[in-house]
Amino acid sequence: MTSATAQPNDPGESTESAEDRVRIFDTTLRDGEQAPGFSMDRRAKLCMAQALESLGVDVLEAGFPQASPDDFAAVEEIARSLHNTTVCALARCQTGDIDTAARALERAHRSRIHLFLSTSPLHREHKLGMSKQQVLDTAVASILHARKYCADVEFSAEDALRTEPEFLVEIFSAAIAAGATTVNVPDTVGYTTPAEIYELFAYLHQHVRDAHKAVFSSHCHDDLGMAVANSLAAVSAGARQVECTINGIGERAGNAALEEIVMALKVRAPRFGLRTNIDTHKLYPTSRLLTQVTGQAVQRNKAVVGDNAFAHESGIHQHGMLKHRSTYEIMRPEDVGIAETTLVLGKHSGRHALRQRLEALGHALDDGALDSVFKRFKSLADRKREIRDEDLEALALNQDPDATGPWHLTQLNTNSHLGGSASATVKLSHEDGREVGEAAIGDGPVDAVLRAIERATGTDMVLTRFQVRAISEGGDAQGQAQLIARHAKRDWHGSSVSTDIIEATAHAALAIVNRIARQDRDSSAAPALQGAIA
């Protein structure tokens, strides 16, 4: 572990050249992971830690080593695995905690010990049973002890926003004198407001002795829905570290969301005049990785990384977007790692968006034909929450959009094997009376099912995207499988819903096969029809 000497470019250093940078302190694996429903095993934690380092976080709080042997092991493994990000371990202001944190961080390339102690009157009386002087003495002694192991020590005054400001000045002044390189002002219970926290940070910068020798940090919870706003207010008042989590996960209502803070600083750079080291193109992939390892989905309307963050259904908005994207988007989806803006077709959509999507699907209609399709589209949209590509193609070809076939799935069986491979057997029936059965082996059950359907129908497809998401909760939750496959130099979309995700995948693949079959049939019928008319 790093000895108590200065570290080059240490996040705890206060230099003139770093005044325009906000350090991102990620606590997804500590404060976020301890929230109900977000528990992660050691492998998942390491995977997330590596993704967070790639994202560019300055400090990664890996866990609370004293909490359990497994937490200790996770911090220890992360500490020796990361090379650029400072790995931080949480510790109470107790000698045993500090010693354990130091042992967990021994092999870290860059390390920090994060001490915390309650300071508010409520916590002093009911949680600690300590006087102001006892709290101050304990904090100083703990910082001095931690400095024996590590040059980078952070001190947090738990429940700072409900602590007397003059006592915060006293304890932060003593903490800096004892060697704390970062002092954290947490809104532990999500109680404050932007104006209030701004005033507090301005007051602390003005009155804490040697304030310039430490980085002031903000850590806000979202109990009143203001964690991000409060964090940005603290930054405006001089905070140069923000403690946050991916997707805003954390105790109770969660923490300030990393992706929202980072993009607010980027989009509103002329106002804040500040930067971060975050590679914003990796925000969406990192968010999705967290949902995969925890099994907890992001709400659709979540800022920056939610499914609806760059989706538009309103006809007015879609019309504006088609003319100039800045009319309704203040940032580009590509900037956060999302492939493109989505114009969702539904009952609120207009002709412009419908025409654009039909043209993308290869159907260029004149105004009269478009009017006819638009009327039927509106009627269908009143019955369906979202219109899919196969629906649009059916409308353009004057078919029944609710039609299925020609292939139907009659039987599906899958088996997984040791080593990761799997086998699948399918039986399909065709509307002409044929029945076909096929079997295949794949890298997993999904791959095996797709191979079997390809063989049974004689349709060549290359899967380019496979996405699964839960659309309900509980043991009988439904999952939606969404596929994109390449066939004949074109992308084809298919989706299906089932309580069995393998079955949903099979039906989604069959939807693609059926669309290809129907188009081939209609294309071959068109010349014969023209000949008959002639």
Image (cartoon, grey):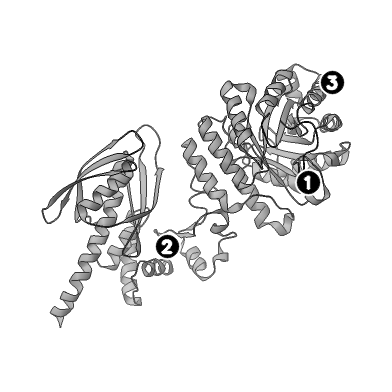
Determine which of the numbered discs, if any, sits on residue 362 in the image: none
Q: Which residue is mark 2?
A: 349
Q: Nearer the viewer, mark 3 or mark 2?
A: 3
Q: Secondary structure at mark 1?
A: loop
Residue lying furthest bottom: 534
Q: Dot 3 corresponds to which residue?
A: 133
Tell me the kind of residue under disc 2: Ser
Q: Is residue 105 visible?
A: yes
Q: Residue 2 versus residue 242: which sits nearer the camera?
A: 2
Numbered-mark total:
3
Q: Quadrant of residue 334?
A: bottom right
Q: Is residue 517 above or below residue 101?
A: below
Q: Are marks 3 and 2 in contact (CB under 8 Å)?
A: no
Find the distance from the CA under tag 3 to the CA under tag 2. 65 Å
Tell me the SS state at disc 3.
helix
Residue at 40% from the left image edge and 60% from the top image edge: 345
Q: Which sits earlier in the primary sequence, circle 2 or circle 1?
A: 1
Coordinates of residue 226 in the picture (x, y in percent): 65, 42
Residue at 74% in and 34% down: 161
Amino acid type shown at disc 1? Ala
Report which residue position mark 1 lands on: 237
Badge 3 or badge 2: first in the primary sequence: 3
Q: Quadrant of residue 478?
A: top left
Inspect the image, locate mark 3, and give the three-letter code of the amino acid beneath it. Answer: Gln
Mark 2 neighbour density, 10 Å: few (under 14) some (14–19) many (20 or more): many
